[in-house]
Amino acid sequence: MAGIGFRLRELMKADTLSGVLLAYSFAGIIGSGPWVLSIVGILLIGFISTENSSVPYFVGQFQISVTYLMAVSLILTGPLQLIITRFIADRLYEKHDELVLPNLIGAICLVITVIGTLASLCLIYFFAGSVLYRLLMLSGLIILSTIWIVVIILSGLKAYREILLAFLLGYGITVWASKELGKFGLEGLLSGFVVGQGILLFMLMVVVFNSYSSNRLIAFDFLRRSQIFPSLAITGFLYNVAIWADKFIFWFNPQTSASIIFPLRGSELYDLPIFLAYLSIIPGMAVFLLRIETDFVEKYTKFYGAINGGASLKRILEIYEEMLATIRRGFFEIIKVQGMTIVILLALGDKLLTWVGISPFYKVLLNIDLIAVGIQVLLLAVLNLLFYFDYRKDALYLCFLFLASNIILTFLSQYLGPVFYGYGFALSVALTTVVGMVIVSKRLNLLVYETFMLHYKTGD
C-alpha cells in the first residue's frame, strides 16, 4: 500500500533541490497524518484563543477535551485498524480492488455503531458539562474514529495532491472555525474543531470514492473468520494503549494533574512538552514513508515475485541482499534525519520555548521527549517490517513489552520524583525498539533458509 510514496518519489527524479524538498515536505505532512496535524491544530487554537479571548479558562478545557478524544478514538479503533489494513492489502494484492470501498464503508458503519453506543452511555452517565458539550464530544469521537479508519487506505492511493489539500483545508478550517466560534466559550471552540474535522473527513472520503469503485455499497467481508487475525487486533490495541499509558498515569495521579472538566484530568507539566515533541517527527515520518513504505516495499515485492516466479536461487539471493541494503539504508536515513532534527531543536530549546510563549521550565522534559519520539519513529519502522513479513506474534510481543515497560517505568519515574519525569516513556520506547531491531535482524538473517528449507509458516 505504498502508492502515494511512489508518486512522491517521482518528484525526486528531477534531481533538483526543489523537487527533493517538495517530495519530503509532502511526505512529512501525509506520513505524519491527522494525529500530528491535530496536535498542531490544538496548539494553534490554544495560542490564538488565549491571545484574543477574555476567557482563556475555556482553552484548557478545550485542549484536554480534544486530547481525550484523540486518545480514546485511537485506542478503540486500534484493533480494527490493523484488521482492515491487512484485509485491504490482501485484496489489493489479489487485484480485487472492487472489495475495498464496500468493506471500508462496512468498517465505518461498525465504528459508528459500536463506538457511538459506548460513548453515548459514558457521556450520559459519567460526564459533566452541558448537553451541547456532550453531543459535540460524541460527534468528535465518532468523526476522529472514522478518520483513523479512512486514513488507512490513503497510503495506497496516488492522489497525494488531493490528500494534502484535504489535510491543509481541513485543519485550516478547524483553526479558523474554532477562533471564530471561541467567543461562545468551550462549546464554541469544540464546535469549530468538530466542523473542521467533519470537513476533513468528507474531503478524504471524496478522494477514496474517486479512487475506488464497486457494485456494492457496503460489505463486511473483513469480519469473516478467515479474515480476522486475533494477534493483529490485540497488537493494534496494545500499541495504542502503550502510546498513551504514561499520559493516563500522569493524568490520574492527583500529585501530577488537576481536574479540568469532570471526569477529565490533565497534567500541564507533562502534556505540553510531549505534544510539542511529537511535532518533531514530521521529518522522520517523511523518510519512513519514502524509504520504508516505498523503497523497501519495491524490493519486498520483487523478492517474493522472484520466489513465486521460479527464479534461480542465485537471483533470489541477489534480490534478498538488495532488500537488506534498502532496509539498512532506510533505518540509517531515519536516524540521520531525525537525529539532525533533534540536535537542532535541542540547541534551540530556550529560544523555541520563548517563541511559542512557554516557560523554559519545560526545557528538560521537552529534551527527553524529543529523543523519545524520535526513537518511536524507528519503532514504527520495526513494526512495519514485522507486519510485512507476517511475523505477527513478534509484533504482538513487542507491543506488549512496550505497554508493560511504559507502565512500570512511568510509575517508577513518578516515585523517583519530577527530575525523572519523561524517562519512563523514553526508556520504554528505547528498550522496545532495541529488542525489536534484534528480532528483525534475526528474522531477516533466517528468511531465505526458512522460506526454502523449513517452509516455515509465520504468524498466528
Image (cartoon, rainbow, N blue to C red):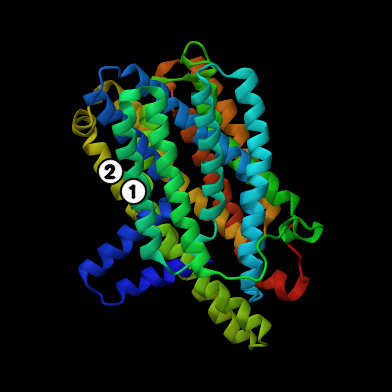
Q: Nearer the viewer, residue 397 or 141?
A: 141
Please state if 276 lies on the left or on the right of 295 as rendered.
left
Which quadrant is the N terminus positioned in? bottom right
* Residue holding disc 1: 339
Res. 204 in view: yes
Count of numbered labels shown in the rendering: 2
Name above or below for residue 281 compared with residue 31: above
Residue name at image x 50 percent, y 74 percent: 298
Q: Nearer the viewer, residue 93 or 458?
A: 93
Q: Amino acid at mark 1?
A: Gly
Residue name at image x 23 percent, y 31 percent: 356
Name above or below for residue 194 compared with residue 452: above
* Residue holding disc 2: 343
Rendering quarter of residue 145: top right
Q: Secondary structure at mark 2?
A: helix
Residue 187 in picture, x, y percent from top left: 42, 25
Residue 170 in picture, x, y percent from top left: 38, 48
Name above or below for residue 102 compared with residue 120: below
Name above or below for residue 62 compared with residue 145: above
Residue that extends furthest to the right in the rendered view of this protein: 225
Mark 2 and mark 1 in contact? Answer it, CB < 8 Å.
yes
Q: Amino acid at mark 2?
A: Val
Give neighbour class at mark 2: few <14, some 14-19, many 20+ (Cα, 10 Å): some
Residue 137 in picture, x, y percent from top left: 52, 30
Q: Secondary structure at mark 1?
A: helix
Rendering quarter of residue 423: top left
How much space separates mark 2 and mark 1, taking CA atoms? Answer: 6 Å
Please state if 234 lies on the left or on the right of 224 as rendered.
left
Give neighbour class at mark 1: few <14, some 14-19, many 20+ (Cα, 10 Å): some
Q: Nearer the viewer, residue 399 or 100?
A: 100
Res. 389 in view: no
Residue name at image x 68 percent, y 40 percent: 114
